[in-house]
Image (cartoon, rainbow, N blue to C red):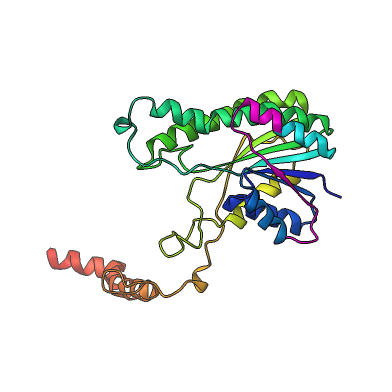
Amino acid sequence: MKGTLLILDATSSIGRALVQVAVDSGRPVIAASLDYPALRALKASHRGADLALMPGSITDESSSAALVADLRELDRPIAGVIVAGCREPIRGRVLDQPDGALQQAVADEVLPQLAAARALVPLLAEGGRNGSYVVIGGPGGENPWAGYGLRSVTAAATRMLLRVMHDEARAQSVRVQMLAVEMPVRTDQNAERACAQWPTAIAIAERALALLDHAGSREPAEAIVRYAWHATPPLSAAPERRAVHGHRPAETPRLLEDTWAALKPMLAPDSIDSTNNKKA
């Protein structure tokens, strides 16, 4: 039996996908969220699954202490934690934001990550060796996300925080990692305008669960694991593409053959000698 997985912000789009993938694989799950009606709906959609509900989340030190106290009452050792939530990013340039906007963004996005890790990494350590703590990160952490300056700053700060915690948690035999998803998530709402490489919440959830499954590996773990998109179809399976410069891509090999057939006589030695004789 796989160890119990705690999912924070389990009623978000990625959180629901994490619950689905986890229970489908037979893993016991504790779903935590401040939205209790959504938690009950989540429970109803997974009847028969080993799914416990935990009303609450972590926003600061006091809420983290309360959540840990509730988890201890369940008396179920936690083998893994996945932090799924992500606030709606604020649009606009950093230079155009009002005074205090950056400080507030850091307080909303970065400090809760620190509070959660302070509370839950020791709890994971109590459950035995090879506990795993995974945070799902969004766009802007590696390169600035155009139009989302504050989001880019806080995402980069969160990424560095995870690197530091990755090193520090080793002493407690807990693996701390971030699954960095440097692109928006494809949803039913944005499907019409979404790019082909945007991952679905299920795809992200599967990758996050795979990190948990490798927590016991002796291979060195990376603090930041980039989500890789492998959905590029082979050319034979690709739909017909648009014409470019008056011809279609499928015609390119034939055009190259025709061009070579025209140039080959001109490049032959006899042709070169003939040309030189004419010049003479």
Asked whether, in this view, residue 121 is left or right of residue 224, the answer is right
Residue found at x 79% / y 29%: 125
Q: Is residue 43 visible?
A: yes
Q: Is residue 61 above or below residue 244?
A: above
Residue 112, given in percent of the width and then of the height, sits at: 58, 31
Q: Is residue 166 visible?
A: no
Magenta part of the chain: 45-66
Q: Is residue 213 magenta?
A: no
Q: Is residue 53 magenta?
A: yes
Asked whether, in this view, residue 192 is left or right of residue 259, the answer is right
User: Tag count in the figure?
Assistant: 0
In this rendered view, identify the residue nearer to me: 207 or 193. Answer: 193
In this rendered view, identify the residue nearer to me: 163 or 32. Answer: 32
In this rendered view, identify the residue nearer to me: 251 or 222. Answer: 222
Q: In which quadrant is the C terminus drawn?
A: bottom left
Residue found at x 77% / y 61%: 47
In this rendered view, identify the residue nearer to me: 274 or 264. Answer: 264
Asked whether, in this view, residue 243 is left or right of residue 34, the answer is left
Residue 146, given in percent of the width and then of the height, sits at: 36, 42
Residue 40, given in percent of the width and then of the height, sits at: 69, 54
Residue 191, given in percent of the width and then of the height, sits at: 46, 63
Residue found at x 40% / y 38%: 144
Residue found at x 49% / y 69%: 235
Q: Is residue 36 above or below residue 192?
A: above
